[in-house]
Amino acid sequence: MRRAPMIVRNVLSDQVKDYLLTAILAGEFPPGSRIVETRVARHLGVSQGPVREALRDLEALGVIDTTPYQGARVRQPQKAELLEAYDVRAVLESFGARLAIPRLSDDDLLDLDGFVAAMRAAAEAGDEAEQARTDVAFHSRIVAITGNGVLQRLWSYLEPVSRTHITYILPGVDAGQISDLHLPIIQALRARDPVLATQAIQAHFQVVGSLFDSLFVEPMAAPPGSQAIAPGVVEETAGEALL
């Protein structure tokens, strides 16, 4: 028997997760701020079930911490943890590039060129959020071309961390520099050279990791007991927990 309602619910929880993750990475939920399940559900017009599932997924991704009887709070990102993720991504994406090359089409290369162009346009417009999103999309596309489901799942686990890296790097560097760092990867893929592609990806993460290491500043955590307010949420009573 088909379980369509469960499928719909899972899709809804993914949408809630994406909403919360985007808000967290945009700084609307500072580290240490509390995310209240009931308020999220009311704000988004959904039941608490999908919100609860979304929070579980975010906890598994390391974005929030959940404490019994205290609810969920946004995690304070740690520099060492974020740098370690770069090392893992370098390994995963180098492997992904080798798998992708035999499947790589000219259209795929055009799409990758388009992502770099979109990054440059976002940089020129000063839209750091869009540049970060497009940066992640560039790397995600290479992994997707492999057709390897296990690799894609492992990579997706690091996707929120990837956006966290970019969010902290962009305000401190020439945004155009971040875009241009992707060009050697495209050149190696266009040459269909697995060794060159591996070298380009490893060099990419070495440079970006070095920038991150020098520019990262531990963000200020929200004061204990603070609660985040998302756009469009109206405080109903002074004592009621917000999003």
Image (cartoon, helix red, strand yellow):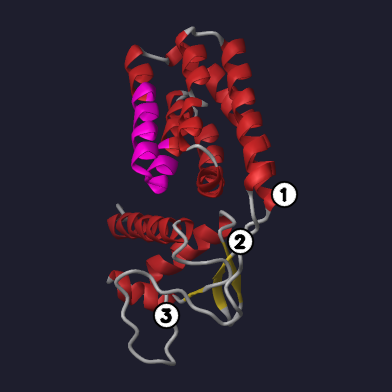
Image spot of residue 118 (x, y percent):
34, 32
Point out the stretch of residues depicted in magenta: 112-134
Marks 1 and 3 close (CB-CB < 8 Å): no
Q: Earlier in the sequence, mark 1 or mark 3?
A: 1
Looking at the image, which residue is at 52% across and 67% down? 30
Q: Which residue is mark 1?
A: 80
Q: Which mark is residue 6?
A: none
Q: What is the C-alpha distance between the residues marked 1 and 2?
A: 14 Å
Q: Nearer the viewer, mark 3 or mark 2?
A: 2
Residue 4 seen in the figure? yes
Query: Is residue 209 magenta-colored?
Result: no
* In the displayed structure image, the side of residue 201 where residue 26 appears, left or right: left
Q: Earlier in the sequence, mark 1 or mark 2?
A: 1
- Residue picked out by circle 3: 242
* Relative vertical location of residue 159 with respect to residue 45 in this rendering, above or below: above
Q: Residues within 10 Å of mark 2 (few under 14, many from 20)?
A: few
Please name whichever residue, 44 or 23, is drawn nearer the observer in this view of the structure.
23
The residue at the point 50 percent across, 28 percent down is 148
State whether residue 46 appears in this view: no
Look at the image and say whether residue 129 sits in the magenta stretch: yes
Kind of residue sitting beneath label 1: Ala
Q: Main secondary structure of the magenta part?
A: helix
Tag 3 and tag 2, C-beta contact below 8 Å: no
Mark 3–mark 2 Cα distance, whole angstroms, equals 22 Å
**Mark 1 or mark 2: which is in front?**
2
Disc 2 marks which residue?
219
The answer to which of 53 and 224 lies nearer the viewer is: 224
**Could you tell me residue 133's position as x and y percent?**
41, 42
